[in-house]
Image: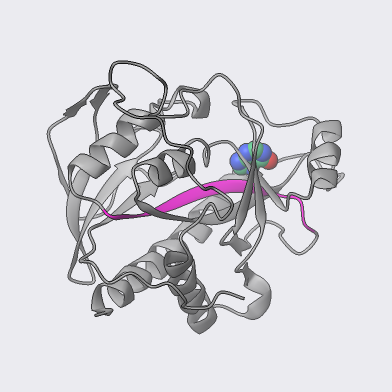
Amino acid sequence: MISEASVSHKPKVFAIIGGSGLYEMPGFSQLDAIETPYGFVHGISRGTLNSVDVFFLPRHGNHHQIPPHKVNYRANIWALSFLGVTDIVAVNAVGGIHSEMGPGHLCIPDQVIDYSWGREHTFFDGSELCDKVSYIDFSEPFTLELRAVLQQQCESTLAPNQFSSWGTYACTQGPRLESAAEICRIRRDGADIVGMTLMPEAALARELELGYASICAVVNWAAGIDPQELVMAEVLATLEEALSTVNLLIAGAIKSLSLHK
Ligand code: HPA
């Protein structure tokens, strides 16, 4: 259960990072590419959701041209921080491992296990771009306040079995899906959902002291959990339906956060 302890009161600037299936926001205007020390970031747009000013960044590019392991996570988070963003709500498509987190379920994870490798995963890399090395506290990877408002939105919109306000996200390398044995291991490790993009994004946001939470749409059972073969058309249909709900939930959450004094 999420409580509203440790709520911060500084003015907030919100960004949404869209995952698979979420590449643009209706009515938003594209910004010019942003140059960062880590490369250019294309595709950020700006607009309003429920009268609140919001930035939007499609993590995979506007046409899903960037695979999970090639996303320039550092440039993306740096660019959002440069634009003055204080809080990020990420959208991630995932596979379900927990028996109650099947296709169509929404999960606001509270923990993460990172199985990805070879990604540029820190700003504190000892290069000339970094003037200090910090060992961030990542014991709670997600911002409580953001998770709490997302949970409130889910509670007021969805039936209790349609969402979970907790869950451990396993971040795999991709772009292939996992083997059944890999999912057995990941399940034994304690993960409830599996995706490819939450890390290092969440940790980089923490390094730059940005609030960060994710809302994950389960689009398939993870490998070996359901004996039936994965049908891509069904996955895409589930994704599309989930994302229209997710958009409403995020718009409500951002409105509610913007009203917090
Ligand atoms: N595994 C990893 N990432 C995913 C999956 C999956 O089963 N489904 C959607 N993203």
Left or right of 200? Residue 248 is left
Tell me, yes or no, if residue 50 can be seen here. Answer: yes
Q: Position of residue 150 (x, y in %)?
A: 46, 69
Q: Main secondary structure of the magenta part?
A: strand
Out of 151 and 140, give the one closest to the viewer: 140
Looking at the image, residue 71 sits to the left or right of residue 183; the answer is left
Kindly indicate the quadrant of the structure image that contains residue 246. Answer: bottom left
Tell whether position 131 is magenta.
no
**Could you say which quadrant of the image residue 72 lies in?**
top left
Q: Is residue 20 visible?
A: no
Q: Residue at x 79, y 30 (%)?
A: 179
Q: Which residue: 12% across, 33% down?
A: 32
**Where residue 259 sits: x, y (%)?**
25, 79
Is 96 a magenta residue? Answer: yes
**In which of the image's four quarters is ligand 1 placed?**
top right
- Looking at the rendered image, the quarter that the N terminus falls into is bottom right
| Region in magenta | 86-98
Q: At 56% from the left edge and 61% from the top edge, which residue is drawn?
A: 108
Q: Residue 226, image x and y in percent?
A: 83, 48
Quarter occupied by the C terminus: bottom left
